[in-house]
Amino acid sequence: MSDNINNNIADLLFEANILKKIPRSGFHFLGAGKESVAEHVFSTTFIAYIISKIMPDADALRLITMCLVHAFLAELVSSICFMYRSYIFFMIKSLQYDFAHE
């Protein structure tokens, strides 16, 4: 891989780690509760894992990937500052490739 792609991946991993410090925006709107984006992602991903065990036809990897990516992308466009938006293009192109080649 090129240095640029490696740098983009390293930046993405660093930014994903920051999600544990970012509060979910919905709680501020509702006026109660407290949960970080990372806590929400963990909960939804665990639910997806359990669903994949209960429903044998469910694609576990696809479910878990959807949970991990949906919250990250949603936070990039709603709760997190503008600097995160530069990673959206990289992630969307990567996911489009992954899902197109399954």
Image (cartoon, grey):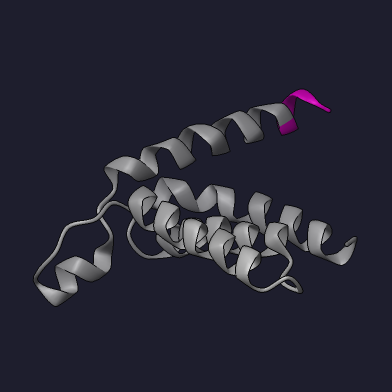
Residue ID at (10%, 69%)? 32
Magenta-colored span: 1-5
Residue 34 x %, y %: 17, 57
Residue ID at (63%, 63%)? 53
In which quadrant of the rendered image does the C terminus lie?
Answer: bottom right
- Residue 93 can be seen in this image: yes
Magenta: main secondary structure:
helix
Q: Left of 76 or right of it: where is 102?
A: right
Q: Residue furthest right?
A: 101
Residue ID at (71%, 57%)? 61
Position above or below: 54 against 94: below
Q: Left of 19 or right of it: where is 73?
A: right
Residue ID at (48%, 64%)? 47
In which quadrant of the rendered image does the N terminus lie?
Answer: top right
The answer to which image quadrant residue 43 occupies is bottom left
* Magenta-span inclusion, residue 3: yes
* Magenta-span inclusion, residue 101: no
